[in-house]
Amino acid sequence: MNKLIKVLFLILYVFFVLFQIKTTNVKLAYNFSASEIDLARHRLNQYPPRLARVAYYWEEKREVQILRRLENNLFSVLDFREYFHERIHYAFAPLIFSGLYLLFRDRKKYTFVVVGLLVSICILTILGPYAIHGPVLMYPFFVFVSLLSIKELLKRK
Amino acid sequence: MNINKLLQNKLVIVLIFIACGFVYFYKLSEIPNGFYVDESTVAYNAKSILSTGKDEYGFAFPIYFRLMGSYTPSLFIYLSAVAIKIFGYYPIVPRSLSAASAIISVYIFYLLLVRLKIVKKQSTRLIISMFFALSPWIVFNARVGYETTFGFMIFNVGAYFLYCALSSPKYYKWAMLFLSVSTYISHNQRFLAPLIIVAYLAFFRKSIFKKENKKHIYEAFVVGLFTQIPNLLMIATPAFWIKNAQFEFKYINNFLMYLSPKTLFWQSPDIDMQHTIPKLSMGYDWMVFFYLIGIYLIARRVKLKNYKFIAMYFVVSLVPSVFSGYFHSSQRSLAFAVPLFIAIGVGVEEAVGRVNKKISIILLLLIFIYSGFSLYSSYFVLFPKERYEAWNYGYDQLANFISEHSNSEFLVDSTRNPRAYILLLYHMDISPKEYQMDVDSIYRDKYYKALPPALEYKFANVLVRPIDWAYDSTRDTYIIGDHLSVSSDQAVEHGLAKIKDFHDPFGNTIFSVFRTSKGI
């Protein structure tokens, strides 16, 4: 990729990041409802007394619960169902998946995009899944990998 | 490989089996907490076959058991009958068959890994076999008392021989034998076995249809034809097609649901609480990275024979579950566990190869401790306390109470659990011979016609059906129901007196026994 395209990509990417931050309710991803706190306490009481300390860390410790939330956010980003059906039609799935394959196959050629994709996954993991327009930060990459697939198809013809 | 290494390998394999044996059999009669309706129906019909040669409806040696209308292939029930004869009529007996099947499945998984040579290092093969064995998906299914895991095991043997046959065609007949036999164990295998054979013939036609293979293909064909005679005899009956009504092409989108990392490693979308474990899905959360690397590498190398076989296995094993309904079923997709964990193994090998040996050993140890505690916490601590209701907890206590009052009449409300009768038949240890005489003979005479289930069941001093207030409150009887069956207003209105409550592990009422005013 030449330098100009990279700069344009970067500017556009920053715009997408800002848009994603602006339209995401981050608090919601780390908010513990009364029923969740109650469930954690209830679960804690199910362990044998000799494991009370470990169980406390496992079920109730705030820091561990926040790590679990981060993990939940990561799995929401990686959840295929998050994108298809409501946001992208299923018909595009083969195009996107084969494009992702091509992107990683030629990762040396597209390092810039691969890094961008991984950074997006990290940002979305931190921000959480409660965004008005969904994981917008991923859409440019879906467009890119779809184009990669189309390019490969045309090359084969 | 030298002798020492060979012994070390064998020792590790034995250790894996010991670990499996411990995890699969530990507190097997107590966890799952309850005896699920599918387990009860299998055990009761196995006992019925054993003592009378007929199932609960009085039909002699069925090919498909009607059970509660599912027309389940029969082999697991006949095997359970043998196990009950040897070990007795206890909940642990059918569950043990699944546990043993799971242990054999682990060995088959390991053999397939060795044969495939997709995972090159022996240490990685052993590690992946261990994580396969101790994955929540396999542990859960190793501890259920119905046909799923036994069918999974026999199918795995068939699939293993199918791969072996690519290099040694004498295995065709063995592959055909096991795949064909698996169709007599569970509904899932009835679809899976033909699907994998068709896919195999399509993808490997150049390796299969050679002149020198002619004899072996012919042998396999004869084995297949011969072993499928019972199924062929059933093909014209509605019982044969009972599950096909759900097989619709519009569900192709479900592939994404089944392959989603969130589904596999974080949160099972299975809506049936009986199928799920709190806080765990099918694999452990850390597996997600290796899964993604693994499927990428399989896609990359798919032109190679061994990778092509796994890619085929990967897709085919999901087809029956994908097309069988709108909702996710972790039980129906169990066959997918084998290619899934092979993909994870490919990913692990690729990742471990890039890390320093000492660091990888430390990481592995940490992962093992983390996974072990996750499993202990979710399955052995939380699962019995949070899923007891889905596992029909409490029916044994109810059965004891009814049996203790053998001179009284009982009505058990079945509004929310129409299949409750089989739980009572099992726990009350009702003689199958006596029950067969109470069953409407239409179910015996038109056994394979898939008739709708009965609305009421009568045996010993029990009647199981929804409450008919106008009639039942005027009789001298005990009424048993869950917390929604009889409200306090209804009890006052119909003059019912509460006799006893049965409680869940937290002390909440699950069943109440009332006496009608006529009996007081």
Image (tube, grey):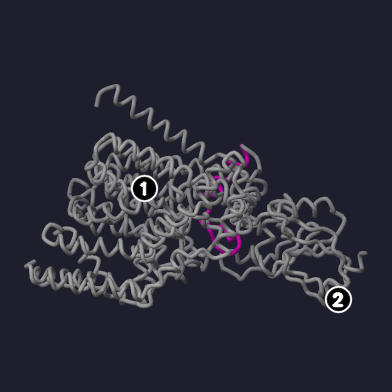
Instruction: Tell how many labels.
Output: 2
Q: Quadrant of residue A119?
A: bottom left
Q: Is residue B77 magenta?
A: yes
N-term mark: 2 or 1: 1
Start-end of magenta stretch: B64-86
Task: Report the front residue among B357 and A116.
Answer: A116
Task: Report the front residue among B495 and A35.
Answer: A35
Q: Is residue A39 magenta?
A: no
The residue that mark 2 highlights is B493
The picture places residue B35, in percent across and down from the top left corner, at 63, 52
Task: Report the front residue among B187 and B324.
Answer: B324
Residue drawn at point x = 56 percent, y = 56 percent: A40
Rounded to the nearest whole Å, what is the CA distance between mark 2 and mark 1? 62 Å
Q: Are marks 2 and 1 on the same chain?
A: yes
The picture places residue B129, in percent across and down from the top left corner, at 37, 41
The picture places residue A103, in percent across and down from the top left corner, at 18, 62
State the SS at label 2.
helix
Q: Is residue B251 visible?
A: yes
The residue that mark 1 highlights is B158
Type of amino acid at the residue the image marks with label 1: Gly
- Density class for disc 1 (Cα within 10 Å; few <14, some 14-19, many ≥20) is many
